[in-house]
Image: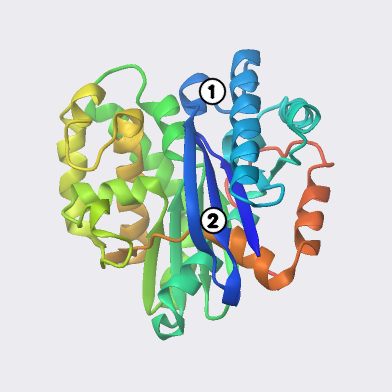
Amino acid sequence: MRISVVDVGSNTVRLVVADAEGGVPLPVHTAKWRLRLSEHVRPGSDIPEEDVERLVAAVGEASRTAGRWGAAGPVAFATAVVRAAPNRHEVLRAVRSRTGVELCTLPGEVEAELTFLGARRWMGWRSGPLALLDIGGGSLEVAFGRGRLPDFVASLPLGAGRLTHEFLQEADPPTPEQLRGLRRKVRHQLRDVAARIRWEGPRTAVATSRTFQQLGRLCGAAPGRHGPFMERQLHRADLRAAIERLAALPAAERARLPGISAPRAAQSLAGAVVGHTAMKLTGLKTVSVCPWAIREGVLLRHIEDGPSWWAEINRLNEAPPPNPVPLRIASATS
């Protein structure tokens, strides 16, 4: 069986085509289309018409590419940047009517659950009680669990792109006052979730997302060309030093640092602050940078539970866009 998934994120549309023999999603083709929605859409604002056009074109091309690789219509989802947009329903209808792809938005808690599943499968059962951190453009997902799915999840409005818009736009590089304001916001939002993680005492902690991968490379982890099976860790002390390094440079110059790509250079500092603060408040000195995340979680759930669970996710899109809340914790269901 060959399946595909399309992920509409804050910066890119990503396609993964995978073979699912033996219950393991083995990628046969990946592709991405750069949108940089986080640069054009302020948190809580409509997605402009020209960006909707680019999004529709990218999803359409991703669907055609999946077909050329022998996969059926892709499982397609969008994360925080579309989820929080007041014109979310218009965007989803435009994609559906013009491409035939049933794009849906995932609640933050579902993002965390699926990302946890991907990380759990990659890390294996020997990792024991597992804590997860995932920094996106619009939100931070946190999860903890002992089994296949997490015992609790939280989705917080602490995405690297969102916080860059909110705190780091007026000066480049930012002022000390801007950084202090950013840290205060992150500490306040993370307080309750961090207390839960400390209380649970995870055996293993993992960090997923492109933001953490780039920060890991900046802090000395092996480059991507060494392959996914190379063990990569991110130490809190190294991340603290990286914040000082990033904060001293304008965004354009950060792109010259190891691992920091030009499209993510502006938000790399906010991502580093979120990552460091999360590790400090949860008491984590080291996290493993995990290559499997939400896309692999979607593929695994599709393989293991069949298409019915995705139909339930699609029904959630009939509800109006959610009002942002500082903390949401929910028990995961299998």
Q: Dot 1, how many residues are within 10 Å of its Cα: few (below 14), some (14-19), or many (20+)?
A: some
Q: Of helix, strand and loop, which one carries label 1?
A: loop
Mark 1 lies on residue: 42
- Nearest the camera: 322 or 304? 304
Q: Is residue 59 above or below residue 77?
A: above
Report the amino acid beneath label 1: Arg
Residue at point 56%, 52% (across, down): 17
Residue 216, percent from left and from top? 25, 53
Q: Nearer the viewer, mark 1 or mark 2?
A: 2
Mark 2 lies on residue: 294
Residue at point 54%, 71% (across, down): 24
Residue at point 30%, 52% (across, down): 276
Residue 231, percent from left and from top? 26, 68
| Tag of residue 164 | none
Residue 260, by quadrant, is top left
Q: Dot 2, how many residues are within 10 Å of its Cα: few (below 14), some (14-19), or many (20+)?
A: many
User: Would residue 246 be found to the left or right of residue 120 on screen?
Assistant: left
Residue 189, percent from left and from top? 48, 48
